[in-house]
Image (spheres, grey):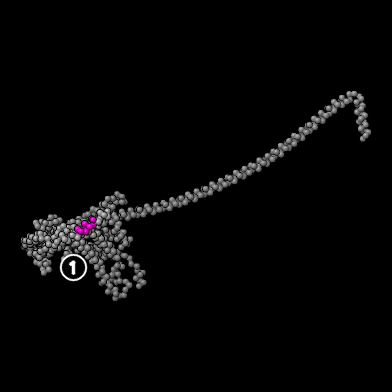
Amino acid sequence: MEKLINDFSFGLFFWQAIILLILILLMVKFAWKPIVQAITDREEGIKNALDSAENARKEMQNLQADNQRILNEARAERDAMLKEAREMKEKMVADAKNEAQVQGLKMIEQAKAAIESEKNAAMAELKLQVSTLSLSIAEKLLKDELSNTEAQTKLVEKMLGDVKLN
Amino acid sequence: MVILNRPLRLIIATFLACLPLISFANGENDSTHVQTETVVHEEAAAVSEHQEGAAHEAVSQDPKEKINAFIDHHLQDSHDFVFFSDEKENAHYGFSLPVILLDGGLKIFSSSKLHHGEAVAEVDGNYYKLVHGKIYKTDAAGTINFNEHGHPENEQPLDFSITKNVVSMLFVSALLLLMFTGLAKSYKKGPIPTGFGRVLEPLILFIRDEIAIPNIGEKKYRKFMGYLLTVFFFVWLLNLLGMTPLGINVTGNIAITICLAAFTYIITQFSANKDYWGHIFWMPGVPVPMKIILAPIELLGTLTKPFALLIRLYANITAGHVVIMSLIAMIFVGKNLAADLPISLGLTLFISVIEVLVAFLQAFIFTMLSSLFIGMAVQDHHHDDHEAH
């Protein structure tokens, strides 16, 4: 302890105090303040950057979820539309088929009717023709038969004979 | 490799086993040599009292005493910067520093006038002499009266000299300013420092994150960062400077550590809040008689904290210097150089590595404890707890 007290030099203490005081003041002014400020700023910058990156990531995720949702909706809509179209097509085809069938039947009916009427007309014509033909034949026959009086009398007699029978 | 290893180990083991055989304690040549040297010294001491002290030198016959004196001298501050000295020719190689004395007016002169304690310096009719690194007032003949303990009894003028330690501190301060203003400037260029600043920045972050914030607290630490950082780098660099061959023992000087501890003490007391003083003078939560007893104890406690600081730093650094100097001195004490040299160098290297660690550790502990004391003074106490008692 005596050695310690003996070793203590007031001059050294004095200079040390002055040097340390000035050093602290200078260091604070020219070194520590700007350094600590720069480090803090940088750390805050890094923190902000990380935060914004995280936010961007979340936003991206939301966006992706939205996209997925919209895509799903679109897909569902497309499916619905396709289904509708298919149904419509089937219905149209069925309708057309029915119509065609009905139309065909109708046409067949008409054709049948037309054929019938044509046939009737033809028959009537034929009948007319046949009657005129038979009349002319009969006329010719009669002309021939009645050209000689004998034959005529025979006929009349025959006819009269028939009438008597009746 | 195994085959190669074994003979190598064997050789080393035999070498070590044979070491005591070749290292006899009776090197005749050396002892005579030393004796002649001391004779020379006695003569020199007779002619003009040597810096080591005439009384001391006359008693010391063997190199051990001389080495002790040398280590003592090394540990102390000095008025000149001596790199090495030649004992035979009594020449010192280095440079002188200004001596500033306050003795009935300011006396400024070069330390070369003191001739390392070998001559009396006359300044404005006053005579001064250097004994054991301290300046004493004397007469023209240079008589120094010693008391029974061998201490000079002459009057001591107030010594404000720019000593070796002051020069070292100025050097370290300049170095610190240079390094850290450089780092501060490098932040202007970009957020990440370049070059040497890359080494310094993690240290600053270390002080902030490991010392200041845990001990003082997130809210208040900023105010004390300047002091803590300055003290940490100041002490560390001075410790490391002591490890250089120049061997300047600054932080192993009691005046330096007292000053550092005083700074911590003053900062602690002036930044202390109401709670801190309340806990010292009127400890809450204990009976009144206990409060009266506790007050002086607590008051003393505020002084023991910086005292522990100053003694710890002083003792650690001084011990390191003494151990290293003693180990190097083995070379000169021992008689067989071939045996002593490797042992001495090996041990010195080993201790030096530890001392480099200690240099950092002591700076760290000093800063750590300073911030701890400051933290204790500024922390907010929970009043609810005390009122509940």
Residue B121 lies, in percent from the top left, at 9, 60
The residue positioned 26% from the left and 58% from the top of the image is: B229
Residue B106 in the image: state x and y as whole percent: 13, 60
Q: What stretch is highlighted in magenta?
A: B7-16
Residue toward you, A18 or B17: B17
For the residue pair B159 and B8, the one nearer the viewer reads as B8
* Image quadrant in which you'd find residue A88: top right
Amino acid type, mark 1:
Met
Circle 1 packing at 10 Å, graded few (<14), some (14-19), many (20+), is few
Q: Quadrant of residue B4?
A: bottom left
Q: Nearer the viewer, residue B381 or A94?
A: A94
Label 1: state its secondary structure: loop
Residue at x-position 27% and y-position 55%: B2
The subunit letter for the residue under badge 1 reads A
Residue B358: x percent and y percent? 24, 60
Q: In which quarter of the image is the C terminus of chain B?
A: bottom left
Above or below, B2 against B264 in this view is above
A44 left or right of A29? right
Instruction: State the residue at coordinates (12%, 60%).
Output: B27
Residue farthest to the right, as pictured: A164
Q: Is residue B55 magenta?
A: no
Position of B27 with respect to A37 (left or right) is left
- For mark 1, what is the residue? A1
Question: Residue B109: image x %, image y %?
Answer: 11, 57
Left or right of B114? Residue B294 is right
